[in-house]
Image (tube, rainbow, N blue to C red):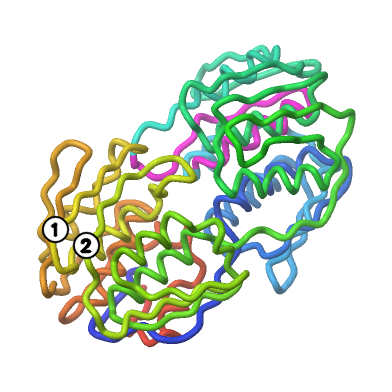
């Protein structure tokens, strides 16, 4: 099993190019199944989750071509199966995103109940209830969601909690439904908007993406097209927090600053000086210790839960006390114990973490418990005295492209061990 060995103490300085967004490319790859010709998806990050989605599309019979720049062409005209098996779905929750496209395009879908990071319950009932409202017949048995519909029908769907994957699945299904579908209390994340942009290029009729009400007028067919995935706001945020923690100076290029308002506001609050243009964010800390910032996670445009662990790491070495309230996932504090092993002063009270910043922390052997927790531990290691070994780095490979290479280019002392 691979590990990361990190020697703390170096400032992060330099430029880093931000990859395409993991949380955008996965639904877009699933959506290629809706077309009656091939799509070419560009700016695709080289991630474990992308590899898993490609394997799933291949198992369904789609033809895939990947070039040297990781641009992926998906031809869905060769699909010969509508079954997404457990052995693939168990490793990545986003696999459930093939449910809507398969059902809408082929009239059948059999998708294993999903797996992924163990950060809390993320119920699939929102997907199922929405598709049933569109007149799908669905049963859940033997660990599989089994759905059929001669043709889905437009419906008004109210989601009783905001769900990104739920919104995306229903949005994709609605594009080929008969009539108009209205999704209320929809997720507003930039990745949902990117999916809607891709679907619109295919010929879908969508209004309201990026708001809490999305209206879709179903069409008879969608065609393949070319689409460039938006930059990963969570990767960009992670590198900016790393610069703030190490007192450094980092410029993230090929970013979408407008998608990062909540994170950038908190970085300013922590004392960082930011310079922002259309596709660049530069952070200057000039050796200063970060100020503590209070965090309350919420659906977009609130503070993203995927940045909670990274800001907890920063608050751990900040000059003062802060509170972090996690409202999205009930089990997303598993990294706290590992951070405490490095000397962090963190106290949990239900879904609230009270963090008293300390002047220095010490390297230690730690274990990544999920994707974003592993990012938080790596950031801790960058400022720790001595050596840190982060185990189970397969989590980080699910969502960060070549993170050790990018950090090394910024001056970090980090290497991968087998």
Disc 1 on helix, strand or loop?
Answer: strand
Q: Using a 10 Å C-alpha cutoff, classify the residue at mark 1 as few (fewer than 14 neighbours), some (14 to 19) or many (20 or more).
A: some
> At which x and y percent is residue 103?
72, 26
How many circles with numbers are drawn on the protein? 2
Q: Quadrant of residue 82?
A: top right
Query: In the figure, is residue 93 to the left or right of 244?
Result: right
The tag on residue 128 is none
Q: Does residue 190 show up? A: yes
Q: Mark 1 highlights which residue? A: 321
Compared with 394, 62 (above or below) is: above
Magenta residues, start to end: 93-119
Per the model, the C-alpha gap separating discs 2 and 1 is 6 Å
> At which x and y percent is residue 27?
63, 44
Disc 2 on helix, strand or loop?
Answer: loop
The tag on residue 292 is 2
Compared with 48, 282 (above or below) is: below
């Amino acid at each position: 099993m691979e590990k990361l060995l990190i020697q703390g103490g170096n400032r992060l300085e330099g430029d880093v190019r931000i990859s395409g967004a993991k949380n955008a490319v996965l639904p877009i790859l699933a959506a290629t199944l809706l077309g009656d010709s091939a799509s070419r998806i560009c700016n695709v990050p080289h991630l474990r989750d992308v590899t898993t989605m490609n394997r799933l599309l291949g198992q369904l019979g789609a033809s895939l071509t990947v070039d040297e720049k990781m641009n992926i062409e998906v031809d869905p005209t060769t699909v010969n199966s509508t079954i997404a098996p457990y052995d693939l779905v168990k490793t990545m929750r986003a696999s459930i995103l093939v449910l809507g496209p398969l059902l809408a395009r082929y009239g059948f879908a059999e998708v294993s109940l999903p797996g992924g990071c163990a950060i809390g319950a993320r119920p699939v009932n929102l997907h199922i209830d929405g598709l049933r409202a569109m007149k799908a017949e669905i049963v859940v048995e033997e660990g599989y969601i089994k759905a059929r519909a001669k043709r889905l029908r437009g419906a008004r769907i109210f989601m009783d909690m905001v769900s990104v994957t739920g919104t995306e699945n229903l949005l994709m299904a609605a594009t080929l439904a008969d009539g108009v579908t209205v999704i209320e209390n929809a997720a507003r994340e930039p990745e949902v908007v990117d999916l809607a942009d891709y679907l619109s290029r295919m010929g879908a009729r969508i209004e309201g993406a990026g708001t809490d009400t999305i209206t879709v007028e179903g069409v008879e067919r969608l065609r393949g097209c070319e689409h460039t995935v938006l930059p990963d706001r969570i990767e960009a945020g992670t590198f900016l927090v790393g610069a703030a923690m190490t007192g450094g100076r980092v410029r993230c290029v090929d970013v979408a600053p407008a998608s990062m308002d909540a994170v950038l506001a908190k970085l300013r609050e922590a004392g960082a000086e930011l310079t922002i243009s259309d596709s660049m964010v530069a952070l200057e800390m000039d050796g200063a210790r970060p100020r503590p910032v209070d965090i309350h996670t919420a659906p977009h445009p609130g503070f993203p839960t995927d940045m909670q662990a990274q800001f907890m790491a920063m608050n751990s070495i900040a000059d003062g006390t802060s509170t972090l309230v996690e409202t999205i996932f009930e089990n997303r504090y598993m990294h706290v114990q590992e951070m405490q092993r490095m000397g962090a002063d963190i106290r949990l009270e239900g879904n609230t973490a009270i963090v008293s910043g300390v002047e220095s922390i010490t390297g230690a052997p730690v274990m990544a418990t999920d994707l974003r927790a592993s990012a938080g531990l790596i950031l801790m290691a960058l400022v720790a005295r001595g050596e840190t070994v982060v185990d189970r780095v397969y989590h980080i490979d699910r969502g960060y492209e070549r993170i050790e290479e990018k950090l090394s280019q910024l001056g970090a002392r980090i290497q991968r061990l087998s």
